[in-house]
Image (cartoon, grey):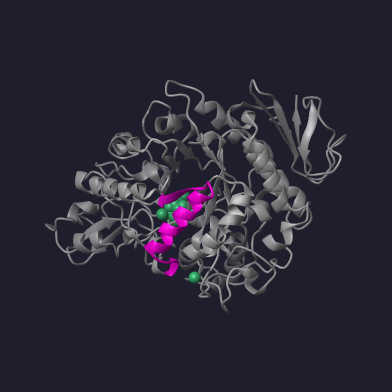
Amino acid sequence: MPDIRSSVIYQIYPRSFADSNGDGIGDLRGIISKLDYLADLGVDVLWLSPIFQSPNADNGYDISDYEAIMPEFGTMTDFDELLAQAHQRGLRLILDLVVNHSSDEHRWFQESRKSKDNPYRDYYIWQPPGGGLPTNWQSFFSGPAWDLDETTGEYYLHLFAKKQPDLNWENPALRQEIYRMMRFWLDKGVDGFRMDVIPFLSKDQDFPDYPEGRFGDLTIHANGPRIHEFLHEMHQEVLGHYPSVITVGEGFGVSAEQANLYVGDRREELQMIYHFDHAVPREEHRFLNPAPEFTLPELKAIFAKWNTALDTGEDAPGWQNIYFGNHDNPRILSRFGDPERFHYESATVLATVLLTQRGTPSLYQGDELGMSNCLFEDISEFDDIQVKNAWAALVAPDMDPAKQMQFLKTANRIARDHARTPMQWSDAPHAGFTTGSTTWLKVNPNYPTVNAAGQDSPPRSVLNYYRQLLRWRKQTPTLHTGTYRDLLPEHPTLWAFERAHESGTFVTVANFSEERVVLPAEVEGKAVLGNYAEPDGDLRAWEVRVYVH
Ligand code: ISL
Ligand code: CA
């Protein structure tokens, strides 16, 4: 089994990847039809965002049956074929495990809400009304985290939307149900799980209000008192019995110092975690008060800090999953690059920096083509519950024109929908994503110039750069396990780092600007790879090079 450290993960957002039957919604047969493309790209592991039965209040992150396929996506037969065909091509497949909450349409919740003595009552978290809301806890998508359920007159907890009630991990019967479900998928041959908001599973049973000054800080719900006991139990009961299983925890609220509690080598919890230190801050009010983007020195400091932390302390070493973007963030090219003026150059800068970093990288679908943010002209063009609920809370009450403008401008920078527009396969109508007449979310109008078919043959294309880089990464052990050292942490526009290992030392140097920069003395050796012909002398606009010495 390949070491996860030499692997690259590719995230598929199934709703937007490829539509096989013309209904405008991506599906499993669509993914099957693109497996050759993915194998040829050179990635190793496919992570599918949720494919399970769901009313789609949060696009599948609200599951109503963990062992059934969402009918819009296909059938279990389609899934079995997808898995077999992926394996035939040497691709491993991991699923999204969303077990902090389910959908309110899950059978367990339907039972749970019926009566206080229903056998499923304790599958969820209920509190009596007392003097009103049990605590002042807030939810991600919709105000207070408690909702009064009329049938029994008690509140249930939902740290996300109302339709996403939190599961009660204190209940051993619930935990066993989850473990059984995990075995069901692993026994089918699934290669592992990406675990949604995994640090949230354990809740403080004293149900304290937010501490003074931290009202609404949702990171407080992470790292609860029994989280490591639960994850260790999951390992004993399930994960440890599948020696080559891949696990990636979504580490919302986990600090660099806490990371090895989850992924330290001997902890028997998870294999990898990914952090949020460089994710777009997304408290609801950000849509009217946007936070500035990270500067390059800030971004570099975050990567350096995590590398050090994972190698430090009694639980070291630990391993992480690294990324620039995913389905919860805008497009990386729009955040950190220059899609209009230096499309090829800045997309390949981001590719090279991520794929030569230390850690197992996750690529997000479409980044290998340089897909960028899409212009949403009106609130009605968005789909995401987060944007819609924030609009309802912040703008709809008075529809103040200045607020509307500010909101739309910010959403056009940070909304999750940017990552969710359909994959751009060709310059055919709807970017070749569907043969039908509509798509569930608008297609980025730049598809005639940015698409996979158009980038397939030209040697100088973002796609061919990724293909070449992924092949080179695979055969270069230094990139898998070599140490990481930032050579110029303070430099405002250059990211220069060294990866050292007995098999060779490499230096990546990337210019995150259009200004020419003199090659610093710290960078030595012979250039082996880059995004400009003749890599020599000053670094040109958005130029990246990798040196060996
Ligand atoms: O995008 C965010 C919310 O506005 C993130 O903070 C996100 O909610 C958080 O990282 C948890 O993400 C995961 O769980 C959510 C789901 O909406 C996200 O898509 C998923 O990645 C609830 O299941
Ligand atoms: Ca379809």
Question: Residue 320 versus residue 180: which sits nearer the camera?
Answer: 180
Q: How many marks?
A: 0
Question: Quick check: 472 left or right of 305?
Answer: right
Does any portion of residue 35 appear in the rendered image?
yes
Which residue lies most toward the front here? 88
Determine whether 331 is above or below 74 in the image: above
Magenta span covers which residues? 72-96
Which quadrant is the C terminus positioned in? top right
Percent across and percent down for residue 523 are 78, 27
- Residue drawn at x 51%, y 24% as measured from the top left: 311
Question: Quick check: 543 left or right of 131?
Answer: right
Question: Residue 239 versus residue 212: which sits nearer the camera?
Answer: 239
Does any portion of residue 350 appear in the rendered image?
no
Percent across and percent down for residue 364 are 57, 52
Percent across and percent down for residue 384 are 49, 64
On whether residue 451 falls in the magenta region, the answer is: no
Determine whether 97 is above or below 522 in the image: below
- The quadrant in which residue 520 appears is top right
